[in-house]
Image (spheres, coloured by chain):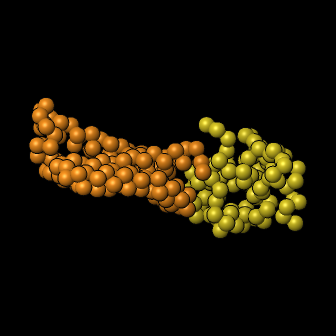
Chain colours: A orange, B yellow
Amino acid sequence: MSYEEKGTWVYLVVSVVVYAAYVGVVLSRADGGPLADVAYVGPLLWSVAGAVVAGIVVRIVVEIARPSESLRTDERDRDLARRGTLAGQWGVVGGALGALVLALADADTFWIANTIYLGFVVMAVVSSVVTLVAYRRGV
Amino acid sequence: MGGKPTRVTNAIRALRFARGEMTQAELAERVGVTRQTVIAIEQGRYSPSLETAFLIARALGTTLDEVFAYPDDDTDAPAGPAPGDVDGATDGRGPRRRRTTR
């Protein structure tokens, strides 16, 4: 497995785990009550920052545990990453459209913010999965 | 998994062995790509850029059309070399490998 493919796996796993942790915190704070009343801003900001830091730390740990043959990034890595990004952008578009609709409907900021955040997570997951499938199956 | 994602075929494996059993890692180093990319190209899972294709041909000491081929529409040549093909006898190019390039 190349250095960049490992990095894509780390990006996918960190994105899913951190978002799952965020959802868990929000649901536990809601404790059966309305979600819109939950103090979500702190956990959301922490999860975004945590995902960035965790992505760096986990990647370093993975390289220490299973060093790559080289840290080189070549045309195939860039090509597959581009394909993943193109597919993943629909997550951001979907999140933005969803947030727009919620704003127009005068929804609570909880739902607007979380729709946008979910869009970013969908982008991360879709782009990672598309890239990893391309690594395995070819293009 | 379905069929090979590309119809571009190649004789890299056969040519590596013909050039003193050059390893995939050596070829990757000469071309400037990762070994995983050389493997993907050899197995028909990735079509390299034209520039990389030229670099591969140069590293193997041959011409582009000796390394890569594209089957005619009316041929049903399998993509990529057959497993264990070390002498180039079955490189998956089909019978018309020279007609389109000369």
Q: Going 15% across and 43% down the picture, which residue do you hit? A: A36
The answer to which image quadrant residue B55 occupies is bottom right
In this rendering, is residue A78 above or below A138?
Answer: below
Instruction: Specify whether residue A106 is in view.
Output: yes
In the foreground, B50 or A44: A44
Q: Going 13% across and 50% down the picture, which residue do you hit? A: A42
In the foreground, A29 or B81: A29
Q: Going 68% across and 63% down the picture, which residue do you hit? A: B53
| Residue A11 place in picture, x, y as percent | 37, 49
In this rendering, is residue B58 above or below A12?
Answer: below
Left or right: B74 as drawn, with respect to A41: right
The answer to which image quadrant residue A17 occupies is top left
| Residue A130 place in picture, x, y as percent | 48, 48
Q: Residue furthest front?
A: A105
In the foreground, B12 or A42: A42
Left or right: B21 as drawn, with respect to A120: right
Q: Residue furthest top?
A: A32
The answer to which image quadrant residue B33 occupies is bottom right
| Residue B71 place in picture, x, y as percent | 80, 53
In the foreground, A33 or B99: A33
Total numbered circles: 0
Q: Going 72% across and 63% down the picture, which residue do you hit? A: B57
Instruction: Specify whether residue B87 is in view.
Output: no
| Residue B35 place in picture, x, y as percent | 58, 53
Left or right: B96 as drawn, with respect to A98: right
